[in-house]
Image (cartoon, rainbow, N blue to C red):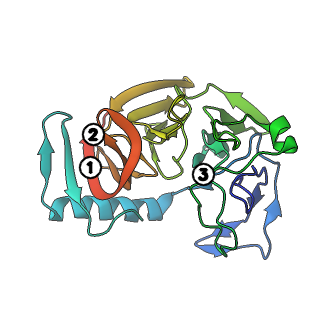
Amino acid sequence: MGGSGENRHTPALEHWSLAVKNGKALEKEWRSEIPIPRGGPHRKPSILSGIWELVLLMVLELLSLKMKINHSTSVGLEGSLLSCPECWLACIVVDDQLLVIGGQEGDFMAKPGSPIFKCSRRNEPSNKVEFRLGKLSADGGRKEVVFSDVYMLDDEMKWKNLPPMPKPDSHIEFAWVMVNHSIIIVGGTTEKHPITKKMVLVGEVFQFNLDSLKWSVIGKLPYRVKTTLAGFWNGWLYFTSGQRDKGPDDPAPKKVLGEMWRTKLSL
């Protein structure tokens, strides 16, 4: 669902579904569903369930046991190094209800002529139409807007607003797990720095309690990180890979990682 057009900037609202069972498609074609309320990139249906979630998390557990563990006394976490570096809104199904969390509108424009619409690291130039649709950034391109919005598709197939995240958050499509009827989200990116316009990474661990419908910050990561992969197994919360910050005093993105960290999590 969602995403961007080929220019990597125009938000898409489309939403499709395909029935599957035991890893096989039950339909020959995708079905068009009700559009999402706000379009934008980093909105990938990253749903793991049943045996595949078990397999992924068993692999994480085996890796943590086989590799040398480095202790960090400042954050109380354990980390290990994977053999290769890294593998934006979260789309999650809970109790047969679809939740859409965070994400963003706008992104760097695509490289002209690139068959895979590769990122150019440049903002799209503005024109009169774009000026009416969005805000202008300091360099003349349309501003990226990061969302804190949370929506749920209810039984009547209507989108319902739920309480927003504690801060706008994007690049979280794989950065979530389900624990005791709560959604746990780690890291991401928030609104750009108001002066430097540089991307600002997120270092918090968020919990959304599905019984009380309340958000809370339940911890901090050893560093800010975006586009990380989260997992939960045998009482341990894991995250691995992604792109981390430049340091404790600079939340801008720098190094792409292959590390894996874990901490005990009890809710």
How far apart in space, not on screen, are marks 1 and 3 (Cα)? 23 Å
Q: Please tell me how crowded label 3 is: few (under 14), some (14-19), or many (20+) other residues with Cα within 10 Å.
A: many
28 or 207, which is in the foreground? Answer: 207
User: Horizontal and vertical percent for residue 264?
Assistant: 25, 39
Name the amino acid, label 3. His
Q: Where's residue 109, x and y in %?
A: 66, 56
Quarter of the image with the N terminus in it:
bottom right
| Residue appearing at x 51%, y 57% in the figure | 49
Q: Quadrant of the C terminus?
A: top left
Q: Which residue is mark 3?
A: 42
* Residue tagged 2: 222
Task: Label 2, secondary structure: give it.
Answer: loop
Q: What label does residue 45 carry, if any?
A: none
The residue identified by callout 1 is: 261
| Label 3 residue SS | loop
Is there CB contact under 8 Å for labels 2 and 3? no
Q: Nearer the viewer, mark 2 or mark 1?
A: 2
**Total marks drawn?**
3
Amino acid at pointer 2: Pro
Whole-number angstrom distance, CA of label 2 to CA of label 3 = 23 Å
Q: Is residue 254 left or right of residue 138?
A: left
What's the residue at 18%, 36% (across, down)? 76
Question: Where on the picture, by quarter, is residue 25?
Answer: bottom right
Label 1 residue SS? strand
- Looking at the image, tell me whether mark 2 or mark 1 is earlier in sequence order: 2
Mark 2 near mark 1, Cβ–Cβ under 8 Å?
yes
Viewer-nearest of discs 1 and 3 = 3
Could you give the CA–CA distance between mark 2 and mark 1, rounded to whole angstroms? 9 Å
Tell me residue 58's x, y (percent). Answer: 32, 62
Q: Earlier in the sequence, mark 2 or mark 3?
A: 3
